[in-house]
Image: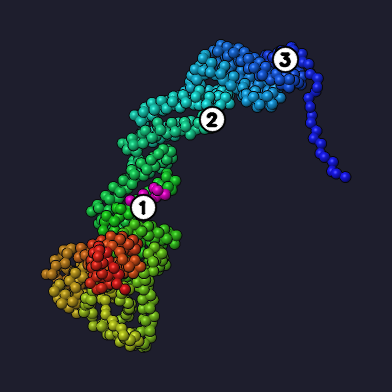
Amino acid sequence: MSAQKKRNFQIEAFKHRVVVDPKYAEKTWKILEHAIHEIYNHNASGLSFEELYRNAYNMVLHKFGEKLYSGLVLTMTSHLKEIAESIEAAQGDLFLEELNRKWADHNKALQMIRDILMYMDRTFIPSTRKTPVHELGLNLWRDNIIHSSNIQSRLHDTLLELVQRERTGEVIDRGLMRNVIKMLMDLGSSVYQEDFEKPFLEVSADFYRGESQQFIESCDCGDFLKKAERRLNEEIERVTHYLDAKSEAKITNVVETEMIKCHMQTLVHMDNSGLVNMIVDDKYEDLGRMYSLFRRVHNGLSIIRDVMTSHIRDTGKQLVTDPERLKDPVDFVQRLLDKKDKHDKIISLAFSNDKTFQNALNSSFEYFINLNPRSPEYISLFVDDKLRKGLKGVSEEDVEMVLDKVMMLFRYLQEKDVFEKYYKQHLAKRLLPGKTVSDDAERSLIVKLKTECGYQFTSKLEGMFTDMKTSQDTMKGFYASLGPDVTDHPQLTVQVLTTGSWPSQSSATCNLPSEILGICEKFRMYYLGTHTGRRLSWQTNMGYADIKATFGKGQKHELNVSTYQMCILMLFNSADRLSYREIEQATEIPVLDLKRSLQSLACAKGRNVLGKEPMTKEVGEDDAFFFNDKFSCKLYKVKIGTVVAQKESEPEKQETRQRVEEDRKPQIEAAIVRIMKSRRVLDHNNIVTEVTKQLQSRFLPNPVLIKKRIESLIEREFLERDKVDRKLYRYLA
């Protein structure tokens, strides 16, 4: 049995014609038209919306959609023209109220009409590409009301006038403004922009241009910024209350341009109140306001930053080059720290910790600190002062704070190796006499230096601490070896220093008193007997001593003096009066050190255990000295310091500089060899760049010195010039 074929069913139209009343469309439209009139006349309560919907449905169904749509347009237009006349007739403040009321009525009517014509909206309008009912109602309102020749300009002027009145301090009906502005927004962004926003921005620009000019002529910088900030906040608030949110960026840009951008240079350089005055007077609030306002405009922050940088560099340069300031290194560094603290606080409190401002500050400090070649020495002297006495009784947190500040200045130094030289000298003068205030603080700073510059930078400094510990153990062994003879000699404490770890010293010695020579010889024999292959040389210029002295009327004191001073004083056990020449011959102390020692013993007020003739402040070669029997002091223990310059003398400075230059030579050569080993062939300029890059953490090598070291390496056949291109250097494996 074959499969049954599929049958296709088709629905066909009625064979007979459906007869429609020829007047059906007209009658039905009249019903709907009457309903629209009633809706606009506020008489909608008596209407049957179900019946009206059915009538509209049937008109569309029977192909009378076009008649329905065109009738709607004509009817709504008619009513809107009447509404326009009503709005035009409203006077004064009633104008906006009438407009707002009629707009609310129109929206309600439009909602009802759309409900009645929902079927037309859903079927006829999409198929014929006509405007939907709601959008049609808005367009007709726009064309017949808002763009009416008698309403458009009046609405525009009224809205702008209300904004102006509010700017001058009057209270306006913000609710009414919000409703009218929202009406314009609902009619489309182009209506809002063209009929309100564009003229609003133009009028605002004129207003703020005039007001800012008035302020700039009558206010100082701080007051101007306050007024600008207030105006900016007012406009932002205005947007919040009754303008389109998208207008905020546009109106704030107008205020920023007219009140800030156009006057930036004038404001920052304003006499007696500009940026520099704010910085000098610590006006954090005004500075913060300037920062927050200027950051809104292009290049605003760069103007503040440039003026601040210029001010810091100028004042910093004055500080580091002022001869009066350079007389006291500790005060010099303290002023640098105070200056840094001041500007750090400004950046923190006023400039939101802006990294670009912090970088500008660091760059400025690095610039002017390195203008003074003695900055490394002075920073080391500052540390020396703090670790001798300045941090006595200070909490650990405060000690760390001071050390961190020192490290901050250290980072700015381009010649860190020069600082290392001085720091090693000053550390030695603290460690050897035991004058450091805290071993923990000393070690903490060395850890910070190691973290900053690496192990090699601090290896010798750490070696100095190792020597001090080893020396204590050595002295215990020495006195144990003496046995009962220990009481027969003066008490001796020796620190054995490793050559290379400690600052290089001149080999100048002096003639020690016979009472000391015996115990010194015993120590030498003990030490060389316990250590093979070593050599001892006494550094008498670095030592100190405690000696007992009896003055007139039997007054006894214990004097803390340097080794040189001890040698001088011991001479007066066998002589009452000695000339400068006799003291020099007996002690063989170097001339400069001898004069300093005599000056401190004879000329220091309250410490003059020796008398001097003639009694002048300076020591001359024809002077005579005698034991001062009349010396008196309330203290039993009397410390007699040596009159030395806190800073290096010019010859000493030249010597230190020369040692630094010598130390740099092998470092530069090592860097050149490392670079050439990896690159094999390189031109001169690139070698200089690479070497500078490698060594800048310790010092900035001079290109001339780099060139000399290259020549030296060529002579010693580490490098050779390329045979073809003489500007290239080749590494010799």
Q: At 31% across and 66% down in the image, what residue appears?
A: 681
**Could you tell me residue 684's position as x and y percent?**
27, 62
Helix, strand or loop: magenta stretch: helix
Q: At 21% across and 76% down in the image, what residue appears?
A: 508
Q: Residue furthest right?
A: 1
Q: At 40% across and 46% down in the image, what residue appears?
A: 346
Q: Which circle, 3 or 1, is nearer the viewer?
A: 3
- Asked if the residues shown at circle 2 and circle 1 are in contact, with their CB atoms under 8 angstroms apart, the answer is no
Query: Compared with residue 94, is residue 440 higher up or lower down, i.e. above or below?
Result: below
According to the picture, the residue beneath numbered tag 2 turns out to be: 244
Does any portion of residue 217 appear in the rendered image? yes
Q: Amino acid at mark 3?
A: Ala
74 or 66, nearer to the observer: 66
**Could you tell me residue 648's position as x and y percent?**
24, 64
Residue 99 is tagged as none
Q: Which residues are magenta?
A: 355-364
CA neighbours of label 2 inside 10 A, class few (<14), some (14 to 19), many (20+) = some
Q: Amino acid at mark 2?
A: Asp
Sequence-wise, the earlier of marks 2 and 3 is: 3
Q: Secondary structure at mark 2?
A: loop
Q: Amino acid at mark 1?
A: Asn
Query: Compared with residue 450, is residue 229 higher up or lower down, i.e. above or below?
Result: above
Q: Which circle, 2 or 1, is nearer the viewer?
A: 2
Sequence-wise, the earlier of marks 2 and 1 is: 2
According to the picture, the residue beneath numbered tag 3 turns out to be: 25
